[in-house]
RNA sequence: UCCUCGAUAGCUCAGUGGUAGAGCAUCCGGCUGUUAACCGGAGGGUCGUAGGUUCAAAUCCUACUCGAGGAGCCA
Protein backbone atom coordinates (compact mmCIF):
# COMPACT_ATOMS: atom_id res chain seq x y z
CA UNK A 1 0.00 0.00 0.00
CA UNK A 2 1.51 3.29 -1.11
CA UNK A 3 2.25 5.99 1.46
CA UNK A 4 0.71 9.17 0.08
CA UNK A 5 1.04 12.77 1.21
CA UNK A 6 -2.31 14.37 1.95
CA UNK A 7 -1.53 17.23 -0.42
CA UNK A 8 -1.54 14.83 -3.37
CA UNK A 9 -4.51 12.68 -2.34
CA UNK A 10 -6.62 13.91 -5.24
CA UNK A 11 -4.20 12.09 -7.60
CA UNK A 12 -5.18 8.80 -5.96
CA UNK A 13 -8.98 8.77 -6.21
CA UNK A 14 -10.40 5.29 -5.66
CA UNK A 15 -7.06 3.89 -4.47
CA UNK A 16 -6.34 2.43 -1.08
CA UNK A 17 -3.52 4.48 0.42
CA UNK A 18 -1.56 4.90 3.65
CA UNK A 19 -1.25 8.22 5.44
CA UNK A 20 1.34 8.70 8.16
CA UNK A 21 0.45 11.56 10.42
CA UNK A 22 -1.41 12.80 13.44
CA UNK A 23 -4.99 13.21 14.57
CA UNK A 24 -5.69 16.91 14.45
CA UNK A 25 -9.23 16.63 15.79
CA UNK A 26 -12.06 14.14 16.14
CA UNK A 27 -15.82 14.33 16.02
CA UNK A 28 -18.05 11.37 16.59
CA UNK A 29 -21.69 10.57 16.61
CA UNK A 30 -22.21 7.12 18.05
CA UNK A 31 -22.11 5.12 14.86
CA UNK A 32 -19.93 7.41 12.75
CA UNK A 33 -16.56 8.96 13.54
CA UNK A 34 -14.80 11.79 11.70
CA UNK A 35 -11.04 12.01 12.09
CA UNK A 36 -9.33 15.22 11.01
CA UNK A 37 -5.93 13.99 9.89
CA UNK A 38 -2.78 15.98 9.22
CA UNK A 39 0.58 14.86 7.90
CA UNK A 40 2.39 18.17 7.43
CA UNK A 41 1.44 18.48 3.79
CA UNK A 42 -2.22 19.19 4.49
CA UNK A 43 -5.41 18.15 6.22
CA UNK A 44 -7.99 15.52 5.27
CA UNK A 45 -11.00 14.02 6.96
CA UNK A 46 -11.14 10.29 7.60
CA UNK A 47 -14.57 8.71 7.99
CA UNK A 48 -15.48 5.53 9.88
CA UNK A 49 -19.04 4.20 9.83
CA UNK A 50 -19.64 1.58 12.51
CA UNK A 51 -21.37 -0.85 10.17
CA UNK A 52 -18.40 -0.80 7.75
CA UNK A 53 -15.62 -1.33 10.29
CA UNK A 54 -14.42 -4.10 12.52
CA UNK A 55 -15.26 -3.55 16.17
CA UNK A 56 -11.58 -3.20 17.08
CA UNK A 57 -10.88 -0.45 14.58
CA UNK A 58 -14.03 1.45 15.49
CA UNK A 59 -13.18 1.23 19.19
CA UNK A 60 -9.60 2.34 18.52
CA UNK A 61 -10.85 5.32 16.53
CA UNK A 62 -13.18 6.23 19.36
CA UNK A 63 -10.32 6.19 21.86
CA UNK A 64 -7.99 8.39 19.80
CA UNK A 65 -7.10 11.77 21.26
CA UNK A 66 -6.05 15.08 19.75
CA UNK A 67 -2.48 14.93 18.36
CA UNK A 68 -2.10 11.17 18.74
CA UNK A 69 0.26 9.84 16.08
CA UNK A 70 -1.41 7.37 13.74
CA UNK A 71 -0.92 5.56 10.46
CA UNK A 72 -4.19 5.28 8.58
CA UNK A 73 -5.08 3.06 5.66
CA UNK A 74 -8.14 3.92 3.62
CA UNK A 75 -9.80 4.53 0.29
CA UNK A 76 -9.63 7.99 -1.26
CA UNK A 77 -13.04 9.26 -2.30
CA UNK A 78 -14.57 12.45 -3.54
CA UNK A 79 -17.37 13.75 -1.38
CA UNK A 80 -19.19 17.03 -1.72
CA UNK A 81 -19.62 17.15 2.06
CA UNK A 82 -15.84 17.21 2.57
CA UNK A 83 -14.16 20.59 2.86
CA UNK A 84 -11.70 20.20 0.01
CA UNK A 85 -13.79 17.67 -1.91
CA UNK A 86 -11.73 14.62 -0.90
CA UNK A 87 -12.01 12.36 2.11
CA UNK A 88 -10.70 9.03 3.25
CA UNK A 89 -12.86 5.98 3.99
CA UNK A 90 -10.78 4.50 6.80
CA UNK A 91 -10.08 0.76 6.63
CA UNK A 92 -7.40 0.37 9.28
CA UNK A 93 -5.56 2.42 11.89
CA UNK A 94 -2.17 1.77 13.49
CA UNK A 95 -1.62 3.68 16.70
CA UNK A 96 1.95 5.00 16.76
CA UNK A 97 1.62 6.92 20.02
CA UNK A 98 -1.32 8.05 22.10
CA UNK A 99 -1.34 11.67 23.31
CA UNK A 100 -2.81 12.73 26.64
CA UNK A 101 -3.98 16.26 27.49
CA UNK A 102 -2.73 18.15 24.44
CA UNK A 103 -2.44 21.72 25.71
CA UNK A 104 -3.81 23.59 22.70
CA UNK A 105 -7.50 22.76 22.64
CA UNK A 106 -9.87 23.63 19.79
CA UNK A 107 -10.79 26.93 21.37
CA UNK A 108 -9.40 30.42 21.33
CA UNK A 109 -6.20 31.07 23.27
CA UNK A 110 -4.23 34.08 24.42
CA UNK A 111 -0.93 35.24 22.96
CA UNK A 112 1.12 34.54 26.08
CA UNK A 113 -0.10 30.96 26.31
CA UNK A 114 0.36 30.29 22.60
CA UNK A 115 3.87 31.75 22.65
CA UNK A 116 4.77 29.47 25.57
CA UNK A 117 3.42 26.57 23.48
CA UNK A 118 5.04 27.76 20.25
CA UNK A 119 6.66 24.35 19.66
CA UNK A 120 3.15 22.84 19.52
CA UNK A 121 1.34 25.87 18.09
CA UNK A 122 3.32 25.35 14.86
CA UNK A 123 1.05 22.36 14.15
CA UNK A 124 -2.04 24.55 13.85
CA UNK A 125 -3.32 24.95 10.27
CA UNK A 126 -2.85 28.69 10.35
CA UNK A 127 0.73 28.52 11.63
CA UNK A 128 1.61 25.79 9.16
CA UNK A 129 0.23 27.93 6.33
CA UNK A 130 2.26 30.96 7.40
CA UNK A 131 5.50 28.97 7.57
CA UNK A 132 4.74 27.51 4.16
CA UNK A 133 4.21 30.99 2.71
CA UNK A 134 7.41 32.17 4.38
CA UNK A 135 9.27 29.32 2.68
CA UNK A 136 7.76 30.20 -0.70
CA UNK A 137 8.69 33.87 -0.24
CA UNK A 138 12.26 32.78 0.47
CA UNK A 139 12.20 30.54 -2.62
CA UNK A 140 10.88 33.41 -4.75
CA UNK A 141 13.62 35.76 -3.52
CA UNK A 142 16.35 33.23 -4.26
CA UNK A 143 14.90 32.38 -7.66
CA UNK A 144 14.70 36.03 -8.62
CA UNK A 145 18.21 36.92 -7.48
CA UNK A 146 19.82 33.71 -8.74
CA UNK A 147 18.27 34.25 -12.17
CA UNK A 148 19.40 37.89 -12.29
CA UNK A 149 23.09 37.11 -12.00
CA UNK A 150 23.40 37.56 -8.27
CA UNK A 151 25.71 35.28 -6.29
CA UNK A 152 24.91 34.43 -2.71
CA UNK A 153 27.70 35.42 -0.33
CA UNK A 154 27.53 34.86 3.41
CA UNK A 155 28.86 37.69 5.58
CA UNK A 156 30.05 36.95 9.13
CA UNK A 157 27.64 36.82 12.05
CA UNK A 158 30.30 37.60 14.67
CA UNK A 159 31.64 41.05 13.98
CA UNK A 160 34.18 43.32 15.61
CA UNK A 161 31.94 46.39 15.62
CA UNK A 162 28.78 48.03 14.50
CA UNK A 163 28.05 48.39 10.81
CA UNK A 164 25.96 51.50 11.20
CA UNK A 165 26.66 52.54 14.75
CA UNK A 166 23.02 53.31 15.45
CA UNK A 167 21.30 50.40 17.12
CA UNK A 168 22.45 48.54 20.19
CA UNK A 169 24.27 45.31 19.43
CA UNK A 170 24.39 42.00 21.24
CA UNK A 171 27.72 41.82 22.95
CA UNK A 172 29.68 38.62 23.29
CA UNK A 173 33.28 37.69 23.86
CA UNK A 174 35.64 36.41 21.23
CA UNK A 175 38.38 34.88 23.34
CA UNK A 176 40.22 38.00 24.54
CA UNK A 177 38.38 40.41 22.28
CA UNK A 178 34.92 41.94 22.22
CA UNK A 179 32.57 40.76 19.51
CA UNK A 180 29.05 41.59 18.48
CA UNK A 181 26.29 39.76 16.65
CA UNK A 182 25.76 41.28 13.22
CA UNK A 183 23.08 43.88 12.69
CA UNK A 184 23.76 44.04 8.95
CA UNK A 185 26.15 42.36 6.56
CA UNK A 186 26.11 45.31 4.24
CA UNK A 187 29.68 46.56 4.55
CA UNK A 188 30.99 43.06 3.92
CA UNK A 189 28.61 42.72 0.98
CA UNK A 190 30.15 45.84 -0.55
CA UNK A 191 33.49 44.03 -0.48
CA UNK A 192 31.87 40.96 -2.03
CA UNK A 193 30.23 43.06 -4.77
CA UNK A 194 33.66 44.30 -5.83
CA UNK A 195 34.71 40.65 -6.19
CA UNK A 196 31.59 39.14 -7.78
CA UNK A 197 29.65 42.07 -9.23
CA UNK A 198 26.19 41.30 -7.96
CA UNK A 199 25.82 39.56 -4.63
CA UNK A 200 23.27 38.99 -1.92
CA UNK A 201 23.30 37.78 1.63
CA UNK A 202 20.46 35.91 3.27
CA UNK A 203 20.79 35.46 6.97
CA UNK A 204 19.82 36.36 10.49
CA UNK A 205 20.42 39.73 11.99
CA UNK A 206 20.32 40.83 15.64
CA UNK A 207 19.21 44.04 17.29
CA UNK A 208 19.49 44.48 21.03
CA UNK A 209 16.93 47.27 20.95
CA UNK A 210 14.17 47.20 23.51
CA UNK A 211 11.57 47.51 20.82
CA UNK A 212 8.19 46.14 21.72
CA UNK A 213 5.86 46.56 18.79
CA UNK A 214 4.09 44.39 16.24
CA UNK A 215 6.82 45.20 13.70
CA UNK A 216 9.89 44.23 15.73
CA UNK A 217 11.84 41.08 16.41
CA UNK A 218 15.16 40.88 18.25
CA UNK A 219 16.40 38.27 15.75
CA UNK A 220 15.14 38.51 12.19
CA UNK A 221 16.19 37.60 8.68
CA UNK A 222 17.38 40.01 6.07
CA UNK A 223 18.22 39.78 2.39
CA UNK A 224 20.92 42.25 1.43
CA UNK A 225 21.77 42.56 -2.26
CA UNK A 226 24.75 44.71 -3.25
CA UNK A 227 25.54 45.63 -6.84
CA UNK A 228 28.71 47.06 -8.43
CA UNK A 229 28.22 49.56 -11.25
CA UNK A 230 24.55 49.96 -10.31
CA UNK A 231 23.32 53.44 -9.45
CA UNK A 232 20.37 54.49 -7.35
CA UNK A 233 17.60 54.44 -9.99
CA UNK A 234 18.54 51.00 -11.27
CA UNK A 235 18.68 49.66 -7.72
CA UNK A 236 15.15 50.91 -7.06
CA UNK A 237 13.95 49.27 -10.28
CA UNK A 238 15.46 45.95 -9.14
CA UNK A 239 13.76 46.28 -5.75
CA UNK A 240 10.43 46.86 -7.48
CA UNK A 241 10.89 43.85 -9.75
CA UNK A 242 11.87 41.69 -6.77
CA UNK A 243 8.74 42.57 -4.81
CA UNK A 244 6.56 41.91 -7.87
CA UNK A 245 8.25 38.54 -8.42
CA UNK A 246 7.66 37.56 -4.79
CA UNK A 247 4.01 38.53 -5.03
CA UNK A 248 3.41 36.62 -8.27
CA UNK A 249 5.12 33.54 -6.91
CA UNK A 250 3.10 33.53 -3.69
CA UNK A 251 -0.20 34.12 -5.49
CA UNK A 252 0.44 31.21 -7.81
CA UNK A 253 1.99 28.77 -5.31
CA UNK A 254 0.18 29.44 -2.03
CA UNK A 255 -3.47 29.64 -2.96
CA UNK A 256 -4.48 27.06 -0.37
CA UNK A 257 -2.39 28.61 2.40
CA UNK A 258 -3.65 32.14 1.70
CA UNK A 259 -7.19 30.80 1.95
CA UNK A 260 -6.37 29.03 5.23
CA UNK A 261 -5.22 32.27 6.83
CA UNK A 262 -8.08 34.24 5.29
CA UNK A 263 -5.92 36.72 3.36
CA UNK A 264 -7.78 39.05 1.00
CA UNK A 265 -5.79 38.29 -2.14
CA UNK A 266 -7.38 41.06 -4.18
CA UNK A 267 -5.14 43.47 -2.26
CA UNK A 268 -2.10 41.40 -3.24
CA UNK A 269 -3.12 41.16 -6.88
CA UNK A 270 -2.94 44.95 -7.10
CA UNK A 271 0.77 44.86 -6.32
CA UNK A 272 2.21 45.53 -9.76
CA UNK A 273 4.92 47.80 -11.13
CA UNK A 274 5.34 50.69 -11.27
CA UNK A 275 5.31 51.54 -7.58
CA UNK A 276 4.90 55.23 -6.79
CA UNK A 277 8.14 57.04 -6.01
CA UNK A 278 7.93 60.19 -3.98
CA UNK A 279 10.71 62.30 -2.59
CA UNK A 280 11.22 62.98 1.09
CA UNK A 281 10.26 66.57 0.24
CA UNK A 282 6.94 65.44 -1.22
CA UNK A 283 6.25 63.19 1.77
CA UNK A 284 6.87 66.13 4.11
CA UNK A 285 4.55 68.31 2.03
CA UNK A 286 1.92 65.57 2.12
CA UNK A 287 2.08 65.32 5.92
CA UNK A 288 1.89 69.10 6.20
CA UNK A 289 -1.13 69.14 3.88
CA UNK A 290 -2.95 66.87 6.32
CA UNK A 291 -2.56 69.62 8.88
CA UNK A 292 0.31 67.97 10.70
CA UNK A 293 3.12 70.01 12.20
CA UNK A 294 6.22 68.59 10.52
CA UNK A 295 9.56 70.23 9.86
CA UNK A 296 11.87 69.37 6.94
CA UNK A 297 14.78 67.46 8.44
CA UNK A 298 12.75 65.46 10.95
CA UNK A 299 12.49 61.71 10.55
CA UNK A 300 9.14 60.02 10.02
CA UNK A 301 7.62 58.21 12.96
CA UNK A 302 5.67 54.99 12.55
CA UNK A 303 2.31 56.79 12.43
CA UNK A 304 3.70 59.13 9.72
CA UNK A 305 4.82 56.18 7.62
CA UNK A 306 1.40 54.57 7.95
CA UNK A 307 -0.30 57.78 6.89
CA UNK A 308 1.88 58.04 3.79
CA UNK A 309 1.53 54.35 2.89
CA UNK A 310 -2.24 54.49 3.25
CA UNK A 311 -2.42 57.03 0.46
CA UNK A 312 -1.41 54.28 -2.01
CA UNK A 313 -2.73 50.85 -3.01
CA UNK A 314 0.76 49.46 -3.57
CA UNK A 315 4.17 49.87 -1.92
CA UNK A 316 5.64 53.36 -2.12
CA UNK A 317 9.28 54.41 -2.37
CA UNK A 318 10.36 57.48 -0.42
CA UNK A 319 13.58 58.78 -1.92
CA UNK A 320 16.31 61.27 -1.07
CA UNK A 321 16.15 61.74 2.70
CA UNK A 322 18.15 64.50 4.37
CA UNK A 323 21.79 63.46 4.67
CA UNK A 324 21.73 64.10 8.41
CA UNK A 325 19.05 61.44 8.98
CA UNK A 326 20.81 58.60 7.21
CA UNK A 327 23.79 56.33 7.62
CA UNK A 328 27.33 57.56 7.01
CA UNK A 329 27.95 55.45 3.89
CA UNK A 330 25.12 56.86 1.74
CA UNK A 331 26.08 58.90 -1.30
CA UNK A 332 24.84 62.48 -1.47
CA UNK A 333 22.81 63.48 -4.51
CA UNK A 334 25.35 65.38 -6.66
CA UNK A 335 22.62 67.87 -7.59
CA UNK A 336 21.57 68.39 -3.94
CA UNK A 337 24.20 67.34 -1.40
CA UNK A 338 21.81 67.98 1.48
CA UNK A 339 19.96 64.76 0.53
CA UNK A 340 21.27 61.25 -0.12
CA UNK A 341 20.54 58.79 -2.95
CA UNK A 342 18.44 56.46 -0.89
CA UNK A 343 14.97 54.97 -0.84
CA UNK A 344 12.82 53.31 1.77
CA UNK A 345 9.99 51.10 0.56
CA UNK A 346 6.84 51.28 2.66
CA UNK A 347 4.44 48.35 2.41
CA UNK A 348 0.71 49.06 2.14
CA UNK A 349 -1.84 48.52 4.91
CA UNK A 350 0.44 49.95 7.59
CA UNK A 351 3.09 47.22 7.51
CA UNK A 352 5.88 49.77 7.54
CA UNK A 353 9.30 49.83 5.99
CA UNK A 354 10.21 46.57 4.29
CA UNK A 355 13.23 47.79 2.29
CA UNK A 356 15.90 50.33 3.01
CA UNK A 357 18.47 50.97 0.31
CA UNK A 358 20.93 53.48 -1.07
CA UNK A 359 23.75 54.21 -3.42
CA UNK A 360 27.00 54.05 -1.43
CA UNK A 361 29.74 56.63 -1.24
CA UNK A 362 32.49 55.72 -3.75
CA UNK A 363 34.77 58.72 -3.16
CA UNK A 364 37.47 57.92 -0.57
CA UNK A 365 37.89 61.58 0.46
CA UNK A 366 34.20 61.94 1.28
CA UNK A 367 34.18 58.64 3.15
CA UNK A 368 37.09 59.76 5.34
CA UNK A 369 35.20 62.98 6.04
CA UNK A 370 32.15 60.95 7.09
CA UNK A 371 34.25 58.79 9.43
CA UNK A 372 35.32 62.00 11.15
CA UNK A 373 31.81 63.43 11.29
CA UNK A 374 30.40 60.23 12.76
CA UNK A 375 33.33 59.67 15.08
CA UNK A 376 34.16 56.28 13.55
CA UNK A 377 37.60 54.84 14.04
CA UNK A 378 39.66 54.82 10.86
CA UNK A 379 41.51 51.72 12.04
CA UNK A 380 38.34 49.67 12.45
CA UNK A 381 37.04 50.69 9.05
CA UNK A 382 40.39 50.63 7.22
CA UNK A 383 39.35 47.63 5.16
CA UNK A 384 36.11 49.38 4.17
CA UNK A 385 38.08 52.41 2.99
CA UNK A 386 40.32 50.09 0.97
CA UNK A 387 37.30 49.31 -1.21
CA UNK A 388 37.42 52.99 -2.31
CA UNK A 389 41.19 53.04 -2.60
CA UNK A 390 41.46 50.06 -4.91
CA UNK A 391 39.21 50.27 -7.97
CA UNK A 392 36.27 52.16 -6.54
CA UNK A 393 33.08 52.18 -8.62
CA UNK A 394 29.52 53.45 -8.17
CA UNK A 395 27.51 50.81 -6.33
CA UNK A 396 24.21 50.39 -4.58
CA UNK A 397 22.44 47.95 -2.34
CA UNK A 398 19.44 47.41 -0.16
CA UNK A 399 18.13 45.32 2.70
CA UNK A 400 14.79 43.52 2.60
CA UNK A 401 13.24 42.52 5.92
CA UNK A 402 11.87 39.02 5.54
CA UNK A 403 9.47 38.92 8.49
CA UNK A 404 7.82 42.24 7.72
CA UNK A 405 7.37 41.08 4.13
CA UNK A 406 5.79 37.83 5.34
CA UNK A 407 3.54 39.73 7.77
CA UNK A 408 2.38 42.03 4.97
CA UNK A 409 1.73 39.27 2.43
CA UNK A 410 -0.05 37.13 5.03
CA UNK A 411 -1.97 40.08 6.46
CA UNK A 412 -0.84 39.32 10.02
CA UNK A 413 -1.20 41.76 12.85
CA UNK A 414 2.19 40.87 14.37
CA UNK A 415 5.55 39.66 13.03
CA UNK A 416 5.85 37.06 15.80
CA UNK A 417 3.86 34.57 13.73
CA UNK A 418 6.12 34.95 10.69
CA UNK A 419 9.10 33.08 12.16
CA UNK A 420 9.00 29.63 13.78
CA UNK A 421 10.56 30.63 17.08
CA UNK A 422 10.41 34.39 17.46
CA UNK A 423 12.95 36.10 19.67
CA UNK A 424 11.08 38.95 21.32
CA UNK A 425 11.83 41.42 24.06
CA UNK A 426 11.81 39.35 27.30
CA UNK A 427 10.92 36.14 25.44
CA UNK A 428 13.60 33.57 24.76
CA UNK A 429 11.50 30.43 25.36
CA UNK A 430 10.99 28.04 23.72
C1' U B 1 13.65 53.55 29.02
C1' C B 2 8.68 55.83 28.91
C1' C B 3 3.07 55.65 28.35
C1' U B 4 -1.52 52.58 28.47
C1' C B 5 -3.97 47.98 29.64
C1' G B 6 -4.09 43.25 31.94
C1' A B 7 -3.22 38.71 35.59
C1' U B 8 -9.70 34.34 38.63
C1' A B 9 -10.10 26.25 36.97
C1' G B 10 -5.43 23.06 32.08
C1' C B 11 -7.36 27.11 28.26
C1' U B 12 -10.73 31.56 27.16
C1' C B 13 -13.34 34.64 30.23
C1' A B 14 -17.64 36.58 33.62
C1' G B 15 -17.83 38.06 38.63
C1' U B 16 -16.34 45.53 40.82
C1' G B 17 -17.28 44.92 49.03
C1' G B 18 -21.24 39.84 51.50
C1' U B 19 -21.07 31.34 50.29
C1' A B 20 -15.97 30.90 43.55
C1' G B 21 -19.04 30.88 38.15
C1' A B 22 -19.70 29.60 32.61
C1' G B 23 -17.88 27.57 27.97
C1' C B 24 -13.98 24.54 26.06
C1' A B 25 -10.47 20.58 27.51
C1' U B 26 -10.46 15.78 30.70
C1' C B 27 -13.51 11.35 32.48
C1' C B 28 -18.55 8.69 32.06
C1' G B 29 -23.17 8.13 29.13
C1' G B 30 -26.10 9.31 24.35
C1' C B 31 -26.33 10.39 19.06
C1' U B 32 -24.98 7.63 11.17
C1' G B 33 -22.47 13.47 7.89
C1' U B 34 -19.81 16.20 11.83
C1' U B 35 -16.96 21.12 10.45
C1' A B 36 -14.53 25.30 17.31
C1' A B 37 -20.35 19.24 16.27
C1' C B 38 -24.30 18.61 19.72
C1' C B 39 -27.12 16.68 24.42
C1' G B 40 -26.83 14.79 29.82
C1' G B 41 -23.58 13.92 34.14
C1' A B 42 -18.80 14.19 37.06
C1' G B 43 -14.06 15.81 38.81
C1' G B 44 -11.22 20.33 38.68
C1' G B 45 -9.54 26.88 42.58
C1' U B 46 -3.88 29.53 47.97
C1' C B 47 -8.54 34.60 42.54
C1' G B 48 -0.03 36.62 40.06
C1' U B 49 3.14 37.78 44.87
C1' A B 50 3.66 40.66 49.48
C1' G B 51 1.64 44.22 52.53
C1' G B 52 -2.54 47.58 53.90
C1' U B 53 -7.97 49.47 54.56
C1' U B 54 -12.58 46.91 56.34
C1' C B 55 -16.96 43.29 60.63
C1' A B 56 -16.00 41.21 55.67
C1' A B 57 -11.46 41.76 49.81
C1' A B 58 -11.19 38.16 43.55
C1' U B 59 -13.37 43.17 44.10
C1' C B 60 -10.61 49.16 47.32
C1' C B 61 -5.17 51.13 48.22
C1' U B 62 0.47 50.49 47.82
C1' A B 63 4.73 47.96 46.09
C1' C B 64 6.69 44.14 43.25
C1' U B 65 6.63 40.18 39.39
C1' C B 66 4.99 38.58 34.73
C1' G B 67 2.47 39.57 30.10
C1' A B 68 0.13 42.56 26.07
C1' G B 69 -0.27 47.09 22.97
C1' G B 70 2.21 51.55 21.71
C1' A B 71 6.42 55.42 21.58
C1' G B 72 11.57 56.02 20.46
C1' C B 73 14.97 53.05 17.03
C1' C B 74 14.69 50.28 12.98
C1' A B 75 13.76 45.85 8.55
Image (cartoon, coloured by chain):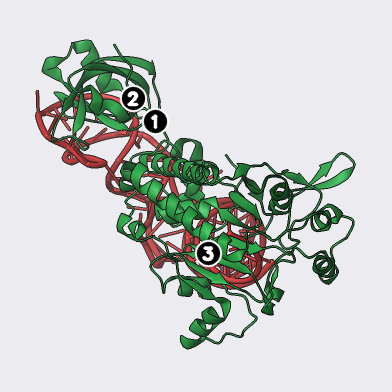
Chain colours: A green, B red
Q: Is residue A214 visible?
A: no
Q: Quadrant of the N terminus of chain A?
A: top left
Q: Image check: A26 left or right of A336?
A: left
Q: Give the CA separation, mark 2 to mark 3.
A: 39 Å
Q: Earlier in the sequence, mark 3 or mark 1?
A: 1
Residue bearing mark 2: A5
Q: Chain of mark 1?
A: A
Residue at (41%, 65%) from the top-left corner? Answer: A314
**Residue density around tag 3, few if under 14, some if 14–19, many if 20 or more, within 10 Å:** many
* Label 2 element class: loop
Q: Chain of mark 2?
A: A
Q: Earlier in the sequence, mark 2 or mark 1?
A: 2
Q: Are marks 2 and 1 in contact (CB under 8 Å)?
A: yes
Circles 2 and 1 on the same chain: yes
Q: Are marks 2 and 3 in contact (CB under 8 Å)?
A: no
Label placed on residue A281: none
Residue bearing mark 1: A40
Q: Are marks 3 and 1 in contact (CB under 8 Å)?
A: no
Determine the image quadrant of residue A22.
top left
Residues A24 and A73: in front is A73
Picture layout, residue A362 above or below residue A176: below
Label placed on residue A345: 3
Circles 3 and 1 on the same chain: yes
Mark closer to the observer (2, 3)? 3
**Residue density around tag 1, few if under 14, some if 14–19, many if 20 or more, within 10 Å:** some
* Label 1 element class: loop
Q: Chain of mark 3?
A: A
Amino acid sequence: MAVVRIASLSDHLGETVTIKGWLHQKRSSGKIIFLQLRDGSGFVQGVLAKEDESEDIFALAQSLTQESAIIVHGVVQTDQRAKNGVELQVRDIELVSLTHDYPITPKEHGVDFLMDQRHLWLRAPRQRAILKIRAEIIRAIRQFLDSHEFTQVDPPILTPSSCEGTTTLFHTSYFDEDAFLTQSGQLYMEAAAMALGRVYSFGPTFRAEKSKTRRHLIEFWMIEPEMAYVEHDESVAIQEALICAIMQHVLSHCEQELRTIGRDTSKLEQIKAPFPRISYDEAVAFLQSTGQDFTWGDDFGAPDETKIAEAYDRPVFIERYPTSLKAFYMKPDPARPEVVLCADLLAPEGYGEIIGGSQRIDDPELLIKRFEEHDLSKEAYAWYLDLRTYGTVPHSGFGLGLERTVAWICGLDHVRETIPFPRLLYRLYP
